[in-house]
Amino acid sequence: MPMNATFPILSVMAIVPLAGALLLWLLPPLRRQGRVIGLVFSLATLGVGLWALSAFDLTRAGTVQLAETHAWIPLLGVSWALGVNGLGLAMLALTVFLVPLVLLAGWGEVPADRQALFSGLVLVLEAFAVVIFAARDVFLFYVCFEAMLVPVYFLIGRFGGPRRRRAALKFLLYSLAGGLVMLVGVVALLVYGPGGEGAYLIENLAGRITTSTATGRWIFASFFIAFAIKAPMVPLHTWLPDTAEQATAGTSVLLIGVLDKIGTYGMAALVLPLFPRESAWAAPVIVVLAVIGIIYGGLAAIAQDNLYRLISYTSISHFGFMVLGLFIGNQIAATGAMVYMVAHGLSIAGLYLVSGFLARRTGTVAISELGGIQRVMPLIAGTFLVSGLASIALPGLSGFVPEWMVLTGTFSQSVPLGVVAVCGVVIAAVYVLLPYQRVFTGAPAQQRMGSADLDGREKLVLVPVIAAMLALGLAPATLTDAFEDLAAQVASTLDDAADATPAQATAAVTPTDSAVVIAEGNTK
């Protein structure tokens, strides 16, 4: 059972950034200080996050802690219910860590007269992200899952590149489609779940959804498709490159580094616990699609001439590793997938932020128009290289341990899948080192001579990111230990569901209904 908090820390973590946004929008005199106010409230949220981290018992990271539950819509059994296990806490920490850096990076990226709007949208987005990663009520999760589309849409459509409106609309259509499909599943949970008080609480639903096998698979699909769009998995990924190409670098950091993790987080926190038998049934197809995504994303990245699009395709490949680790049915691989979620958020932040700084100096992110940057801006070149090496799992940096764990766990379950996934590692070296050679080595163009390198503010943005990459690469045990119990639950959920006999699957048939209890997973 969840461990209740003596103080609503998680609610406060969501309220603080929302309060900052409301101050900026409702008090016009404060808008001229939009940069400062946004940064102050994001740092305050980071402080609350550190408070939550100190109050969390890492030795029991597989248990939901800091829990709070308040009635919201009693008629439907909907609650304002928050709480986090080790994975949820890690995603919250990643969120509150990156938001101040994005706002600080945007200091020179967004015009001063639009900073209040930009900062407010980022703070609202942070508030929704906090609730999503902490939600224990599926209905609450869904509401914030849909609501976060609004600030992201405006961040892309108001602050992006020349084709920003088209990119924002494409993002919105894909996300709304996933949300509408998920809504069917959310409604079905009320019909086929246990009902009563707390009808939408994850701990009440886990292993207790009663329906026919066919209906259960449709409900499972409604959740999985929504998360696969968000993840983004091939073939539901096409919105991402267009969006990343037009969005500001800071928006892409939040979108890909944090919000897209809602896809993989939702698979681990909702899909697997609620639908263990359906997950085991679909796992063979899911892992094949994940491996296809690893290879496709890597090959597509190599073909790009735009740095922002290139980085987005590398992320499609990395998300393939995360999904593979979650659904291969191995504890080591599941642990690696969860660590991968954090590691990718750090490396993607480094790549997008430094690319944004480069774009402001050169006016382009077209690889064919760049060259020799290392001689002119060595700090930018070095930061890009370190972030790229972290993304391709260089030992000692954040990406090495999670990728190694996913591959090790995959080989233990399927050698063919493991071999194909390893090919993705080889491709990754090409899609990072080849662009680095084309952009940063050689003789610089005459117009690049004299361009400024990173200034003090930009160093302040990038140093914490690089430090976090090194810390996770050199001391990964903090996360691997925290995720161990949860990863064991994920792996055993798939194993137990796959091993269940048809007789066990149909053991609970009521006299008045032919409903079948199809999920008898862990109810912790």
Image (cartoon, rainbow, N blue to C red):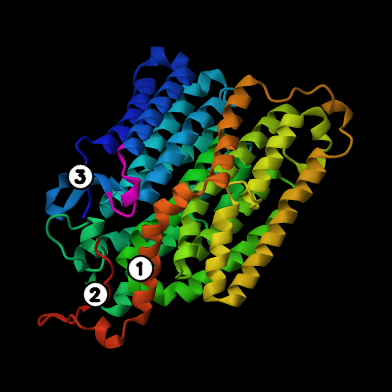
Which mark is in front, 3 or 1?
3
Disc 1 residue type? Phe
Residue 436 location, x and y as percent? 76, 44
Q: Quadrant of residue 221?
A: bottom left
Q: Read off the magenta span.
A: 55-64
Q: Main secondary structure of the magenta part?
A: loop
Report the side of 199 relative to 267 (left or right).
left
Give the mark, 3 or 1, whose residue is nearer the N terminus.
3
Q: Residue at x 58, y 41 (%)?
A: 469
Q: Residue at x 59, y 76 (%)?
A: 415
Residue 220 is labelled as 1
Name the residue that disc number 2 marks: 211
Is disc 1 surrounded by few (<14), some (14 to 19) or many (20+) residues within 10 Å?
many
Name the residue that disc number 3 marks: 4
Q: Quadrant of residue 407?
A: bottom right
Mark 3 vs 2: CB contact within 8 A: no
Image quadrant where one finds the N terminus: bottom left
Image quadrant where one finds the C terminus: bottom left
User: In this rendering, is residue 103 above or below 156?
Assistant: above
Residue 227 location, x and y as percent? 43, 58
| Residue with the most extreme top position | 29
Q: Is residue 261 magenta?
A: no
Report the side of 91 relative to 189 (left or right).
right
Q: Nearer the viewer, residue 18 or 182?
A: 18
Report the side of 411 relative to 117 (left or right).
right
